[in-house]
């Protein structure tokens, strides 16, 4: 008898978790970005949008030191939750695990001008770097398969994004 909680995983198949399965465990809730990673298509984009919403509602209201602490703690939490969830799924970096996008985009938003248009540009730039994974992002994505690896490639995508944003600000194309 097959469970409805989590699709059976044949060798080589990608498990598609259900909401019931995700919301039964704290690490899964974190890894799946409070459920945003269950949305299709493009779960990474939904996760990034969730991160933006959480940024506006909660994180951006903290002083800079508080944001720094939240980023460090959220990164560490993501390493643990994504490692544990990936191990449970038998897939170290399932596309629905989007906590990495959330935390990395918080870093981008922290260092981006606080108006809507610069944040929208940051969103687009970050998604492009996260999707296309230029070197060394792609290398880290393929090489490191632990929770740390899941988190690291998005932090590198955030670094590329921040470089582009800094250039746009420097050359007066973004205020």
Image (cartoon, helix red, strand yellow):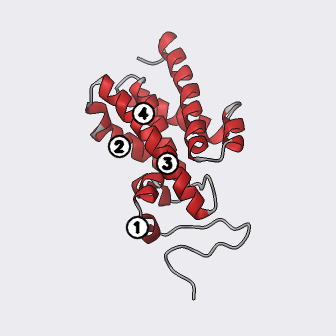
Cα gap from disc 4 to disc 2, whole angstroms? 19 Å
Asked whether 28 or 57 is in front, the reply is: 28
- Tag 1 residue: 24
Write the residue at 53% across / 58% down.
85
Mark found first going from the N terminus, 3 or 2: 2
Question: From this viewpoint, which residue is outermost toward the bottom?
Answer: 1
Looking at the picture, does residue 35 appear above or below residue 69?
below
Mark found first going from the N terminus, 4 or 2: 2
Asked whether 33 or 46 is in front, the reply is: 33
Residue 58 in the image, given as x and y percentages of width and height: 28, 39
Which secondary structure lies at badge 2? helix
Mark found first going from the N terminus, 3 or 1: 1
Cα gap from disc 3 to disc 4, whole angstroms? 13 Å
- Tag 4 residue: 72
Q: Quadrant of the C terminus?
A: top left
Cα gap from disc 3 to disc 2, whole angstroms? 23 Å
Depth check, mark 3 against mark 1: the one in front is 3
Mark found first going from the N terminus, 1 or 4: 1
- Mark 2 neighbour class, 10 Å CA radius: few under 14, some 14 to 19, many 20 or more: few
- Tag 3 residue: 80
- Tag 2 residue: 53
Which secondary structure lies at badge 1? loop
Cα gap from disc 3 to disc 1, whole angstroms? 17 Å
- Mark 3 neighbour class, 10 Å CA radius: few under 14, some 14 to 19, many 20 or more: some
């Amino acid at each position: 008898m097959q469970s409805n909680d989590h699709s059976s995983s044949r060798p080589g198949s990608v498990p598609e978790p259900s909401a019931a399965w995700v919301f039964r465990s704290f690490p899964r809730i974190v890894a799946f970005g409070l459920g945003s990673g269950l949305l299709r298509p493009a779960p990474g984009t939904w996760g990034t949008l969730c991160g933006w919403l959480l940024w506006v509602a909660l994180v951006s209201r903290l002083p800079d030191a508080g944001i720094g602490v939240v980023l460090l703690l959220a990164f560490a939490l993501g390493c643990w939750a994504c490692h544990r969830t990936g191990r449970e799924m038998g897939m170290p970096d399932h596309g629905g695990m989007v906590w990495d996008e959330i935390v990395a985009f918080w870093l981008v938003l922290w260092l981006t001008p606080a108006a809507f248009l610069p944040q929208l540009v940051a969103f687009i730039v970050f998604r492009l770097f996260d999707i296309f994974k230029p070197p060394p992002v792609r290398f880290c994505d393929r090489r490191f398969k632990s929770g740390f690896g899941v988190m690291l490639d998005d932090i590198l995508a955030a670094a590329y994004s921040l470089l582009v944003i800094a250039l746009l600000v420097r050359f007066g194309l973004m205020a």
